[in-house]
Amino acid sequence: MIAVDRWTGEEALLLRSVKRQSVRAFAEDLGISPRTVSHWRENKDRECRPSMAQILDAALAQCTQEEQEAFRFRLAALRGDSIGAAGLEDAQPAPCTVVSHKFLPVYLGERLGSLYEAGAPRPSGPGGLEQRVLPGGHRTAHSSTIHVYACGIALVLLEEHQRVDSLTELAVWRYRSYLADRAWVGQRMTHLLGQYSPGGTAVDPSPDPEYVLSVYELRDHSWTRAGLDTALQLLTTPSVLVNRQNPQNITPLGTGVEDAKFREGWAHPEAVAFDGGASRGVAGWSGVAYHPQPDERALTTSQIASLELDVQALWALSSHVLHMIEEGKDPVMPAEYGWRFLRGAYVRLTTARPTETAQHRVMREAILATSELPDRLRAAQDALRDSIQ
């Protein structure tokens, strides 16, 4: 039995991580409000009240042996204690092959109409959003597509295959390539809008994406269970391996940092692990990492990508609405993409379907919980509703 002498928000979030639960599911199991879990994220160092500590003690005691062992390892790593479990000492950086999927959304609004008409029809994803697809035209990516959503979002998806000697090398490539990718998307959107607009109207300013979200599929590697879990965590949160003080010159933090992470069995307290049958995955704020196994029952990376396409399109759309409010403007959207549209997307993404497998449900909940998209959709929905009253 593991004893936690002092429960804080950080330990509570660590328990949620090893249980691989969404914020809502974790709160329901504990019999508390989801707001309390969100409060822990904002106040990680604050000690829990005795009554809450008892609830967390009971939840930890009810965990499986595997979950308790994972909690013990991660708690020791969090506190800087040594870990003497067999297998972790042998986990270390190693070469691997990953397939990087980058999602770069841009809000275009009414300017998108000509692109949408030019795209090839594509079935709606989990969010039920109408979309069409154009060739991306990226010169070096394994594949590139532009997903054009009728609600005003264009989302570029880049698939790139990388063979690296360490995850630090991959993290450096990831952040450095983001700058070039965002600039390229802005130029590509400008070109396409001019090409398909009546009379080739010039576009000003260039519509650059605000951010990049990554999904990494881990393929060839030599890690065993403990090393694999750490590798997926580092793929999800690569910022712990690099120095980002100068965005124009991302550099490794130093020799030995990645070695220490593997040795400690490092895990981010806010990342949420999920299973895909025999496969394993981790969802975090900046991305998703997944290691598929050749099992016909397991989730596929394409299922994760399909969900992320709609999630990132809706994130960009809700961000546009919230940005207008921040700038002191009344948010205005076409009637067909107003608050009822956002409400429908929210319900479709957060409601389980009769045909949905347990693996898909856990993956969906992990991605939605770490992205915080449901909260943003509700905020944008309320803002649009208030603007017409």
Image (cartoon, helix red, strand yellow):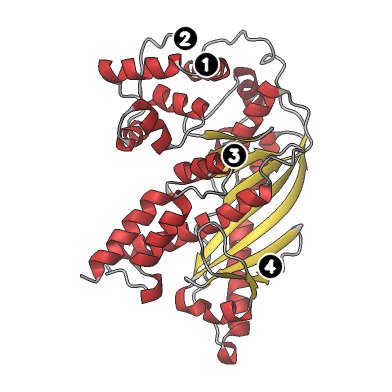
Q: Name the residue under label 1.
A: 68
Q: Check disc 3 and report its element: helix, strand or loop.
A: helix
Earlier-in-chain disc, 2 versus 4: 2
x, y (%) of residue 270? 47, 33
x, y (%) of residue 279? 68, 35
**What type is the residue that disc 1 sits on?**
Gln
Q: Mark 2 points at which residue?
A: 2
Q: Mark 3 points at which residue?
A: 359
Q: In this view, does 209 lie to the left or right of 168?
A: left
Earlier-in-chain disc, 1 versus 3: 1
Q: Which of marks 1 and 3 is in front?
A: 3
The answer to whether 151 is drawn above or below residue 313 in the figure is: below
User: Residue 190 falls in which quadrant of the image?
Assistant: bottom right
* Mark pair 1, 3: CA separation: 21 Å
Is residue 334 something one can see in this rendering? no
* Mark pair 2, 1: CA separation: 7 Å
x, y (%) of residue 202? 55, 84
Q: Name the residue nearer the viewer: 184 or 353.
A: 353
Q: Mark 4 points at which residue?
A: 136
Q: Which of marks 4 and 1 is in front?
A: 1
* Mark pair 3, 4: CA separation: 31 Å
Residue drawn at x 40%, y 50% as measured from the top left = 374
* Mark pair 4, 1: CA separation: 46 Å
Earlier-in-chain disc, 4 versus 1: 1
* Mark pair 2, 3: CA separation: 28 Å
Discs 3, 4 touching: Cβ within 8 Å? no
Is residue 40 something one can see in this rendering? yes
Q: Residue furthest bottom?
A: 199
**What type is the residue that disc 2 sits on?**
Ile
